[in-house]
Amino acid sequence: MKYTPITDEIYAYMSATFPAEDDFLRTLKREADEAGFPPIHIAPEQVAFLQMFLKATGAKRVLEIGALAGYSAVGMARALPEGSSLLTLEREPRHADFVRRKVREAGLENIVEVRTGDAAQLLREITVDSLFDFVFIDADKVGYTTYLDLTLPLVRVGGVICGDNTLAWGNIADSASTDKTVQALRNFNAAISTHPQLQACLLPIAEGMTFGVKVG
Ligand SMILES: C[S@@+](CC[C@H](N)C(=O)[O-])C[C@H]1O[C@@H](n2cnc3c(N)ncnc32)[C@H](O)[C@@H]1O
């Protein structure tokens, strides 16, 4: 076997040794739950990974597609230095309002901007003074390839585009699947792994994250 299966014991060990979720993020999730939001935030270990990644790459301009309750946005924004910005796009006004409140409570309102609307539409309207260092795609899965195409011109060479859930909850290898989400994620992985401007890999963390660095 070329990999180690993540048992509950290993997962508990990882969470205890590399904690990424503090009281603020735990409370955010509880309040989102009480507000009836679906529990589809990224996992704590993804926050840990993204924070390390953003710091390692010196990212200052981040774009997120799909905010939900702001768990990933707050997690990422905390890893950014002074003078950075994180723009997150969210279709549901109720989600967007919740995120704005949590961003204020976290003291991150100078960094995080939430735009409400359909991501594809909002992406077409974006004009940038400086290109993005990192794009995190975590909205409707059928839109992923469109978001890849629309964000690529907005990312600097050396910048990275990442799509979440790219193991499709264990179904990504099922080429016969008629599930639209599985098909969309397979199409996204195919597009990012073969794109001439990108060098990509799939990281098997949580539900899978696919990364592509812009090389040209
Ligand atoms: C998986 S959740 C995002 C989770 C969030 N990134 C986190 O980990 O905290 C997906 C979010 O994308 C939003 N969404 C879905 N389709 C969208 C679209 N076409 N445009 C913008 N947002 C969309 C949903 O309303 C939902 O809030």
Image: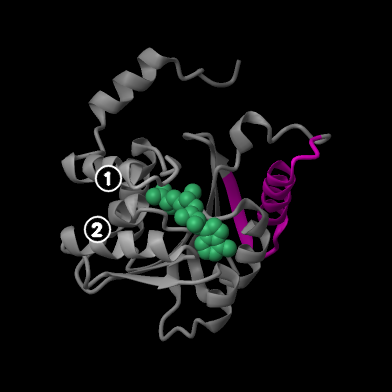
* Mark 1 burial class by Cα count in 10 Å: few <14, some 14-19, many 20+: some
Q: Which residues are magenta?
A: 177-201
Disc 1 designates what residue?
A: 31
State the image quarter where residue 103 is shown.
bottom left
Q: Pinpoint residue 86: horizontal percent, then vertical percent.
A: 34, 67
In the rendered image, residue 207 lying in the magenta stretch gets the answer no
Q: Is mark 1 within 8 Å of ligand 1?
A: no
**Residue at the location (42% across, 58% down)?**
67
Amino acid type of the residue that numbered disc 2 sits on in the rendered structure = Lys
N-terminal-most mark, 2 or 1: 1
Is there CB contact under 8 Å for labels 2 and 1? yes
Residue at mark 2: 102
Could one spot residue 213 in this view of the protein?
Answer: no
The kind of residue tagged 1 is Glu
The residues bearing labels 2 and 1 have C-alpha atoms spaced at a distance of 10 Å
Identify the residue at the far right of this view: 176
The answer to whether residue 57 is visible is yes
| Secondary structure mostly taken by the magenta-highlighted segment of the chain | helix
